[in-house]
Image (cartoon, helix red, strand yellow):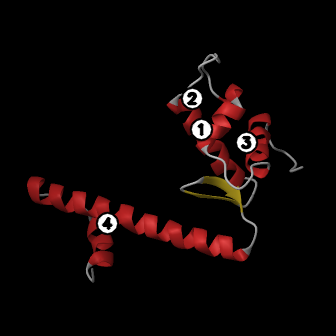
Amino acid sequence: MIPNLTTDEKAVYDCIVNSNGRVTQLQIAHLEPFLGSHPIHENYTPKASTLRRIRQIVRDLRMKHDLHILADTKGYFIMKNKEDGIKYVKDLEVTAKAQAKAWFDRYRKMSKLVGIKSDYFEQQGKLFEDE
């Protein structure tokens, strides 16, 4: 048991720890429907606000409680070894670079259309000069 977890944090953490491999946000929402602020009924479909809440709880578990919760395209899971962490960071880097490149491309287009410059994006653009 991890001390000082809120009821919601404990519920989400338990879903992740007790999953057989990975658990998705949707699965957590179905397992713990009280996390959302919407009525629960037979044909329950989680709302976007519930999924945002789950993402925030997972972020809090990582950042505030230092829990080793990783994620990939198949869902959340607990890091079992250093190799899991290394792969996660490499995947995170690929995603971050792709997002940064997409934002820079949008900036470059708007810069030409509107005729403005941003020191931040100009500095960021130096990262993509070799590509």
Mark 1 or 3, closer to the camera: 1
- Residue picked out by circle 3: 12
Secondary structure category for the residue under label 2: loop
Chain-order first, disc 4 or disc 3? 3
Chain-order first, disc 3 or disc 2? 3
Mark 3 or 2, closer to the camera: 2
Contact, mark 1 vs mark 2 (Cβ under 8 Å): yes
- Residue picked out by circle 1: 26
Residue nearest the viewer, comparing 31 with 1: 31
Residue at 63 percent across and 50 percent down: it is 59
- Residue picked out by circle 4: 101
Residue nearest the viewer, comparing 122 with 17: 17
Per the model, the C-alpha gap separating discs 2 and 4 is 32 Å
How far from the left and from the top, in percent, is residue 60?
67, 48
Per the model, the C-alpha gap separating discs 1 and 4 is 29 Å
Q: Residues within 10 Å of mark 3 (few under 14, many from 20)?
A: many
* Tag 2: amino acid: Pro
Secondary structure category for the residue under label 4: helix
Chain-order first, disc 2 or disc 4? 2
Chain-order first, disc 1 or disc 3? 3
- Residue picked out by circle 2: 46
Q: Residues within 10 Å of mark 2 (few under 14, many from 20)?
A: many
Residue at 31 percent across and 66 percent down: it is 101
How far from the left and from the top, in percent, is residue 39?
62, 16
Mark 1 or 4, closer to the camera: 1
Per the model, the C-alpha gap separating discs 4 and 3 is 33 Å
Q: Looking at the picture, does residue 126 appear above or below residue 47?
A: below
* Tag 4: amino acid: Lys
Residue at 75 percent across and 58 percent down: it is 67
How far from the left and from the top, in percent, is residue 87?
59, 73
Per the model, the C-alpha gap separating discs 1 and 3 is 12 Å
Q: Looking at the picture, does residue 117 appear above or below residue 131?
A: above
